[in-house]
Amino acid sequence: MEALAFVIGVVLMVVGLAVSIALHELGHLWPAKKFGVRVGQYMIGFGPTLWSRRIGETEYGVKAIPLGGYISMAGMYPPSPKQVSAAASGHRSGKAGGGFFATMVQDARAANDETLLSEDDDRVFYRLPVWKRVVIMLGGPVMNLLFAIVLFAILLSGIGIQTATTTVSSVSECVIPSESARTECEPTDPQAPAAAAGMQPGDVIVAVDDEPISTFAEAAALIQASPEQAISITVERDGETLTLPLTPVAVEQPVLDARGQPVVGEDGEPQTERVGLAGIRQEVDYLREPVWVAPQMAFERVGAVAGIIWQMPVKVWEAGSTLITGEERDPNGPLSIVGAGRLSGEVAAADAPVLNRVAGFLELLAAVNIALFVFNLIPLLPLDGGHIAVALWEGIKRVWAKVFHRPPPKPVDATKLVPVTFIVVVALIAMGAVLILTDIVNPVSLFG
């Protein structure tokens, strides 16, 4: 059953990613059609087409590899002068001299020219005002951000955050030695301090040693800090306030770091500490947050992801180096879709209530959409941020010409940036391959 749950979690992540991509491309499609641009295709995925249907002038379809998507807009770049120049020079219009990158530029221009009906075609992207082009290209990332906010709203305001309350859910009858594997009490086991003090399930802890507490964590910290010391526990029971004397028993427990992992000493052995134990368990409840907390959390995550994205080459290098060194990976570092799928599988297969697993999946999918939002705003082609940067540069040139009473500049020919685009694509593929390999060989795990 655990293996089946893991597979279901991976499948859910693939479906969630496909939905995220579909929404991203819709964010481009809707304003493009609103502004009159001809859109030839709306495709989810890459590779062979599994299904498609033409509605009006646009073909909508799904492809075999759900790792991306695209819409094809007419005139993403200004038309090239290849027809005129080729005729004047006697060269064939399909080739370009000057080497590999020059050929790439020519091929990009040729592919773009095929989307133009004529030189007077007005339903093209490059003829739009700058602000409309920015809106179209921003539409995709913004849809991912909005989807993340919706997911966080479902998580925080619909399901709620699992929180340990100050209500006692159960009281242990005895103290079982930590080295013992049994769970049942034996006659020789000492009575648990909470049971000896008369605590009962349903008691609400309001103070420890006369210090008011608002969370169970505060109560636990005060109890743990008082091994074999007489303290008082103030509880509310059936409308009454009772003060119970309690002496926590001293036990040894591992020292944990901020990530919940055991701290190892210089001798290689796990470090332990002496703490107090009362023998009570807290009641867990789901506390719902106001709806405005969802966008707040989304923007906090945007800042965190942006801090990783601008260091992406370094972070990928660090992750890839663990393949050689065998060191533990940074759990806050970048992941590939393989890594996200593994985490989703772990969440689905976890030994936890179904609601907890649903909440974990929603948080993971929201994080993926935050990453898509930030990543696509990087101002490099072929990413959306690159197209936005080109549009803004053209807008700056137009304002400059207007201020200094110069002729309007020609549209910026982004096909000249194809060599840069090629380098960016190769870098993205290389970093993606390193992350995928690392996520297979040395994956990040939610549970250590």
Image: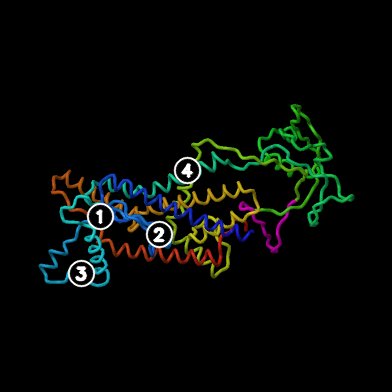
3 or 2: mark nearer the eye: 2
Q: Amino acid at mark 3?
A: Gly
Quarter of the picture holding the N terminus: bottom right
Instruction: For the residues labelled 4 and 2, say whether their Cβ atoms are less than 8 Å apart.
Output: no
User: Which residue does the numbered mark 1 point to in the structure image?
Assistant: 74
Residue 117's x, y, as percent?
Answer: 19, 56
Q: CA distance from mark 3 to mark 2?
A: 29 Å
**Residue 264 lies in the magenta stretch:** yes
Badge 1 or badge 4: first in the primary sequence: 1
Badge 2 or badge 1: first in the primary sequence: 2
4 or 2: mark nearer the eye: 2
The magenta stretch is 257-273
Residue visible at 51% across and 55% down in the picture:
13
Q: CA distance from mark 2 to mark 1?
A: 20 Å
What kind of element bears circle 1?
Answer: loop
What kind of element bears circle 2?
Answer: strand
Q: CA distance from mark 4 to mark 2?
A: 23 Å
Residue 398's x, y, as percent?
Answer: 20, 47
Q: Amino acid at mark 4?
A: Val
Residue 131 shows in the view: no
User: Which residue does the numbered mark 4 point to in the structure image?
Assistant: 150
Residue 94 is labelled as 3
Residue 45 is labelled as 2
Q: Amino acid at mark 2?
A: Gly
Most foreground residue, 240 or 355? 355
Vertical arrangement, residue 219 with respect to residue 380, above or below: above
